[in-house]
Amino acid sequence: KDQLQDLIINDKIAEQAIYEAKHFAVKFKETFGNYPALFFSGCKGCHVYTFFKATRFKNLNLAVSWFAENIEKSYNLETLDLSVVQDATARLSRVPYTKHQLTGLIVVPFLIEDDYDEIIMNSLNPYVENFNKEDYKTDFHKHLQKIDQVETYNSKVRSINRTQNKVKLAHSRNFKHVYDHRVFFKSILGDPIREYPDKEYVMYNCPFQDHNDRKPSFRVHKKGYYCYGCQKRGNYWQFLKDCNGWDDKKIKMFLFKNNASYES
């Protein structure tokens, strides 16, 4: 705990996250009229809050994920952790003015004009300030509703395409079988980043190039794979098809040349 706290205080390892949170807050205000509320997490990151009218969504998780992935690319937010928005409606937020269990530092609010040392000093010697959520209310829900409509439709299209692909591929797999996808992916991607023997799956950085996966979110189990970042899922055949752009003939040639029934 002392070592991590020292890295935050003296080596300023949270400085980039705080800078990027401020940068995002400025852009957010330009679009939605108010700054979001900014909180230092007590560790290496920040929390950003906005408040809006209670609204019905078809799939809020999809909308929030799409928004986060696009602002990450648009504003080059290297410290934005996309894993926290994959299940946004179930995500628990760290309570303000509580102590972070890994550092002993306190979750505290900060303003755009606060410098790094001032924020850390407030975390070490916190005092509870008045907080009025009305100051941070926006029409962000209207933007999310538009994303929600588009992404819900796109999700249905992707689901239909996956179903059609499964039907097509079911007729062309009789000659080879992959019995354990963990062995198959190890032969292609090398050793996994993380292994969970008790849970019978392993984790890789996602090999698909349409998102930046700094933290491993590509899960491989015995029967297939799923990426928490880009939501791609399937088996070895679907992977070779989607990742390499191969048709069925080329996949058959690849499997034949590798002569493999991948077993553990």
Image: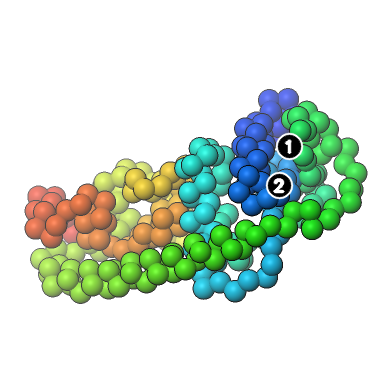
Q: Left or right: where does residue 70 sit relative to residue 109?
A: left
Is 49 located above or below residue 80 in the figure? below
Q: Is residue 195 visible?
A: no
User: Residue placed farthest to the top in the image?
Assistant: 10
Mark 1, secondary structure of its residue: loop
Question: Considering depth in this image, is 68 or 143 the residue closer to the camera?
Answer: 143
Q: Quadrant of the N terminus?
A: top right
Name the quadrant containing residue 228: bottom left
Do callouts 1 and 2 mark residues in contact (Cβ within 8 Å)? yes
Q: Residue at x 31, y 48 (%)?
A: 186
Q: Report helix, strand or loop for mark 2.
A: loop
Residue 95 seen anywhere in this rendered image of the structure = yes
Q: Residue at x 51, y 44 (%)?
A: 72
Residue topped by disc 2: 35
The residue type indicated by label 2 comes to Tyr
Image quadrant assignment for residue 170: bottom left
Three-letter code, disc 1? Ile
